Image (spheres, coloured by chain):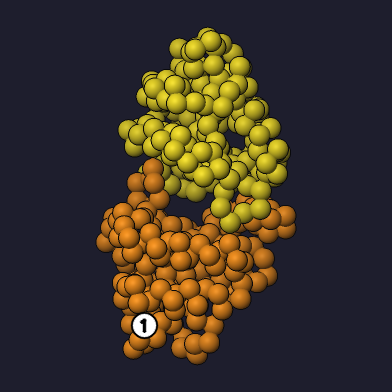
Chain colours: A orange, B yellow
């Protein structure tokens, strides 16, 4: 089930990120930093809304989203990650659907999910397309030469 | 001439933003917030590099740029604004050229300038094109319905 993240989820959230196998160290380190701000300032104050998919006490995945400054109703999906060991289908789908519903309730019009154009992220890009996202824009060589930024959007 | 911004420039920077006539209140208010972080944490600590074009003690324009997290060599041009009363040509060009040189010295590969697709920003978009930028990506209805995000990029 989906819950708002609490302090006790922190180590499992970090662990999922580290074990996912596709993120670099700077990316992995960004999650505890965001979680720290979220715990200290709250979702509104930090701009980071954290939700988790929990099975009992076990966290199977998490999502982070937040309002994009200077826009009317745009939200960024900063992170969505599922435990690579989980055999449970639909954890990612449940997390993304819950994030979209929360954004809609906050008056959001558009969700933006940014990802990489490399082969390692092919399943991530396919997941967004299955979930109704469109690759609306691309910036060549953004992350590094040969690694494009793919901007996926969905009107919610 | 171009200088690194100092505390004394703050009120003129804010004043230029307010008098430009195209920015909304949230946008105008974001500049003193960024300037405050820049003064307190420095350019590296805050992520905001502030430069000004000064004629004697008068600030005729400013630019803010900074490194984009999680990329290898991408810098955002957060702001560039010129006093609407100045008759001096080339202030914007000098500020943008100096920003690009500074980015290049920091190992930057790409500068990203985001702007609006509305008629009010036509001269801004033309300025970027004259300066060698390309409208590489667009997100429809980003700022608000009918107001697209236009992402301009330049390889430096």
- Tell me, yes or no, if residue A122 can be seen here: no
Q: Which residue is drawn at 39% across and 22% down?
A: B11
Name the residue at the left extreme. Answer: A105
* Label tally: 1
Where residue B70 appears, as percent x and y from the top left, is 58, 56
B52 displayed left or right of A40: right
Q: Which residue is drawn at 61% across and 17% down?
A: B1
Q: Which residue is drawn at 68% across and 70% down?
A: A119
Looking at the image, which is closer to me, A155 or A30?
A30
Q: In this view, does A115 lie above or below B6?
A: below
B122 displayed left or right of A6: right
Where residue B105 appears, as percent x and y from the top left, is 70, 38
Looking at the image, which is closer to me, A150 or B92?
B92
Where residue B49 appears, as percent x and y from the top left, is 55, 36
Disc 1 secondary structure class: strand
Quarter holding residue A12: bottom left
Where residue A35 appears, as percent x and y from the top left, is 40, 65
Q: In which quarter of the image is the N terminus of chain A?
A: bottom left
Quarter holding residue B19: top left
Q: Residues within 10 Å of mark 1 (few under 14, many from 20)?
A: some
B11 displayed left or right of B71: left
Q: Mark 1 points at which residue?
A: A54
Q: Is residue B142 above or below residue A19?
A: above
Q: Mark 1 lies on which chain?
A: A
- Tell me, yes or no, if residue A57 can be seen here: yes
Q: Quadrant of the C terminus of chain A?
A: bottom left
Q: Residue at x 35, y 77 (%)?
A: A8
């Amino acid at each position: 089930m989906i819950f708002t993240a609490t302090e006790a989820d922190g180590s499992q959230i970090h662990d999922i990120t580290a074990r996912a196998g596709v993120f670099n160290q700077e990316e992995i380190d960004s999650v505890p930093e965001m979680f720290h701000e979220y715990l200290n300032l709250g979702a509104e104050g930090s701009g980071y809304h954290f939700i988790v998919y929990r099975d009992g006490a076990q966290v199977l995945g998490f999502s982070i989203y937040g309002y994009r400054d200077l826009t009317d109703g745009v939200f960024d999906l900063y992170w969505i990650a599922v435990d690579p060991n989980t055999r449970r289908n639909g954890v990612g789908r449940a997390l993304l659907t819950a994030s979209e519903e929360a954004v809609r309730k906050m008056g959001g019009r558009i969700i933006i999910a940014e990802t990489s154009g490399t082969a390692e992220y092919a399943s991530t890009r396919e997941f967004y397309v299955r979930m109704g996202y469109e690759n609306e824009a691309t910036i060549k060589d953004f992350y590094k030469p040969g690694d494009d930024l793919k901007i996926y959007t969905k009107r919610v």
